[in-house]
Amino acid sequence: MSDRLKAGDAVRRKVLGDAHVDRAEAGKTPFDAPFQDLITESAWGNVWASDAITPRERSMLTLALLAALGNFDEIPMHIRATARTGASKTDVLEAFQHVAIYAGVPRANHALRLARETFEEMERSVRGETEGQG
């Protein structure tokens, strides 16, 4: 495993969590393994590993770009990652307001709905964990 791939795995785990990465790794096949390694090495080991901007800022940029380009399937995963990157609900709203102005209201509206649903799911999960502890 290359140093960049190792760094990418570490950053990916820090941002998305071990459970997410472990599930993704378990689902990797010989067919898509080179693609998964490319993403881990390039996106996580190069872009996300850079300290030129903060993880919070990187989260906001990623969410805005995903929404602007209509890549909605990735939005819930990156909303969940905000719990680790420090991007707040207000940060996410601001990012999507930029999307509305510069890329279109329908895309921002759809992204905002996904964010709201994901934040609600996250809050229910936290409440469930705390209610189960005694």
Image (tube, rainbow, N blue to C red):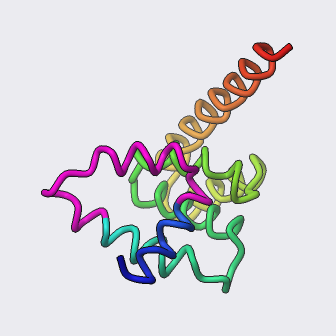
Indicate left or right for 31 with 47 as reference.
left
As drawn, 47 above or below 32:
below
* Percent of width and height locating residue 96: 62, 54
The magenta stretch spans residue 27: yes
The range drawn in magenta is: 13-36
Give the residue drawn at x 61%, y 44%. 80
Question: Which quadrant: the N terminus?
Answer: bottom left
Indicate left or right for 29 with 120 as reference.
left
Give the residue drawn at x 52%, y 62%. 12
* Percent of width and height locating residue 105: 53, 49
* Percent of width and height locating residue 44: 48, 71
Give the residue drawn at x 76%, y 57%. 86
As drawn, 96 above or below 50:
above
Pick whichever, 91 or 109, lies toward us: 91
Indicate left or right for 128 with 5 as reference.
right
As drawn, 113 above or below 132:
below
Give the residue drawn at x 57%, y 77%. 49
Query: Which residue, as the protein is rendered here, is positioned at the far front?
Result: 1
